[in-house]
Amino acid sequence: MADYTIKDIRNIALISHAGSGKTTLSEAIVHNAGVTSRFGTVEDGTTVSDYSDDEKERKVSINSSILSFDYKAKHITLIDTPGYADFGGEVMGCLTAVDSAIVLVDVCEGVEVGTERVWALANEHKLSRLIFINKMNKENINFDATVNNIKERLGKGCVLVTIPDATGSNFKSVIDLLDSSSIDGASGLLKDKAKKLRDALIEVIAERNDELLEKYLDGQELSIEEIEKGFRKGVSSGEIFPIFCGASVLNIGVKEVLSAIVNILPSPDQSPAKVVKDAKTNEDRELKPDPNASFTANVFKSISDPYVGQLTIFRIFSGTIKSDTNFYNATKQSRERIGPLLTLFGKEQKPVTDAIAGDIVSVAKLKNTSTGDSLCVEKDAVLFSKVDFPEPAISFSIKPKARSDEDKISIALQKLSAEDQTFMMKRDEQTKELIVSGMGDLHLDIMINRLKKRFNVEVEVGTPKVAYKETIKKSAKVQNKYKRQTGGHGQYGDVWIEIEPLEKGKGFEFVDKVVGGAIPKNYIPAVEKGVLEAMSKGVISGYPMVDLRVTLYDGSYHDVDSSDMAFKIAGSGALKKAALEAGPVLLEPVMDVDVIVPDEFMGDITGNLSSRRGKIAGMDIKGKSQVVKAKVPLSEMFKYASELKSMTGGRGSYTMRFSNYEEVPHKIAQTIITKYEEQRKEEQEK
């Protein structure tokens, strides 16, 4: 058995906007814990967590990296997540597996858009958090302004725990407000400031605990034990978010964060219970983080390792599992035999004999298990909620340069898509092209580079394709009868449907309102299948239809000639007929675009975004630069990077992420529809 209990486990994700220093902080933490003898750097490509070739080459985190280690009788798992929005799917998966997060803030930049995004995700998962203001060694910074910015953007529960002794090149250490000796070691005005901030911290702790508050208001002094206990409780409940500061690259302020991981952040049994579905009854139930309960776990990440094959990484939420045993995959309804359990430390894998509730471990070479799957014992099967990963917003057509790679490319793409839930591949039925889709240019560029370096497949990249969709604007009722007689048994299916638009993002609903046996129950699924097939191809432009409800309310059948196939064809034809009467329109993906530029380029940037049908949503200040926030159709953003570079002399940058779908203006939609009709005509003539 593990030589620690569930109370000794800490699972933490490092999250923030790109460039805030997550990887360096993780490196400093494991170095302070005595796990590594060398302090690696991102610049040299020697960090534990950024170990892949593409991360070393680009000097940015692309994958989430798992760092499991023991320190002061605690079993700690840090997950260093990427900050770029293109790799947001990595963050979303990992946040389902942790109990808390360390949120980094660059003192020079304050709370950036990426930090706000991951903070909101952490709120959804009810994670405990501490904040680390990084890069205190930079010159010309305003620590107090950054703290105020944090409180404004992230909430009043954010409260200082450590403060710097100085800033810039004079920054040498931090003062711990919970440590009286640390405050006594300060001098002059700094000591007075520290005492006031300690009082403010104690007040925040007391306010969140009725027993302490009563004592505090009566003027009684709180003991160190009471303060620490109240602090832990406030952090675990998500009412207090302690703010630490330091410079991870200089290893200053890191030991205080490591101490907080051990003493303040919650263990799995102190976190909110995980709600799952009972696989048999489909009813909600809460999992108790009990090592003696039935085994349950959720797969949150997969890695294609060049030496051991696919690694499946999962968090155990209850029970215990041993190496070389088996489990039941409730998602796939299959049993899996497993080999050794492994803990991960960057690219290193260490075998362990067993794992308990709260542990994060991995297994190699599973046959049927993938990211998002629910693992358990068959007699007590449960299903975890699926992560709602963002839809890919940009696509390219690719084909191998060498014919000999045609078989290899599909296998390689399947392995890459198994690793990354926001990277998808499909074969276009109409054009026969192989299409890869991802979250942005950088995302796809890295995936194509991996094809070459990891799988030795070089590809030619075609023009990006925008993932348009279709929907309807009004309701319509139609009848569609499919009848064919060819000698012997014929085919007969008759359906009456009503279609109506749903709210944005609602997807599809199929409602069965057939009464009196007008259509036998066994044919209803065939009608729905035909409707879905027609929706997948659209009616005006070949793009899939979304956000509509289809109600089947009447029809007729023939005792001899009716079949599943007949009703499927009838359902498909009914959908096409009804959609054409229901005001079909084309939808396009719209992106949230943040353009960061010096003041003097603001006019050029806003004008250029407007020319791309962009809508300016607001402006913000980031350090000495301006941030233009806009919503722009994806189809207008191709080649924007090169234009921005040209307009700003290389001083501008931008981030882009999917926002929503909006209706395409009529004139542009008509061009797309006309082009589609011409392509169909050419194909029919061939």
Image (cartoon, rainbow, N blue to C red):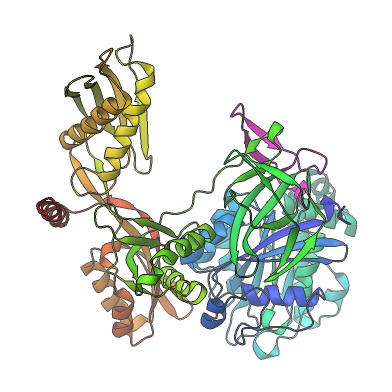
- Location of residue 400 (image quadrant): bottom left
Residue 118 in sight in this render: no
The number of numbered badges drawn on the structure is 0
Tell me which residue sits at (51%, 80%) in the image.
58
- Above-or-below relation of 135 to 410: below
At 29% from the left and 46% from the top, the residue drawn is 544
Percent of width and height locating residue 650: 37, 86
Q: Position of residue 71 (x, y in %)?
A: 84, 67
- On the picture, is 662 further left or further right than 388? left
Farthest residue in the bottom direction? 169
> Which residue is drawn at the image coordinates 46% and 58% (left, top)?
422
**Residue drawn where x is 59% and y is 88% of the image:** 139
Q: Which stretch is magenta? A: 267-296
Which of the two residues, 674 or 461, is positioned nearer the viewer here? 461
**Quadrant location, the C terminus:** bottom left
Residue 391, given in percent of the width and then of the height, sits at 41, 54
Looking at this view, name the residue that lies furthest to the top.
Answer: 516
Could you tell whether 62 is left or right of 611 in the image? right
Question: Which one is in front, 169 or 648?
Answer: 648
Q: Is residue 495 magenta?
A: no
Q: Is residue 472 above or below residue 651?
A: above
Q: What is the x, y in percent for residue 334?
A: 61, 40
In-image side of 38 versus 603 (left or right): right
Q: Is residue 301 left or right of residue 569?
A: right
Is residue 496 something that shows in the picture?
yes
Q: Is residue 274 magenta?
A: yes
Q: Nearer the viewer, residue 641 or 386?
A: 386
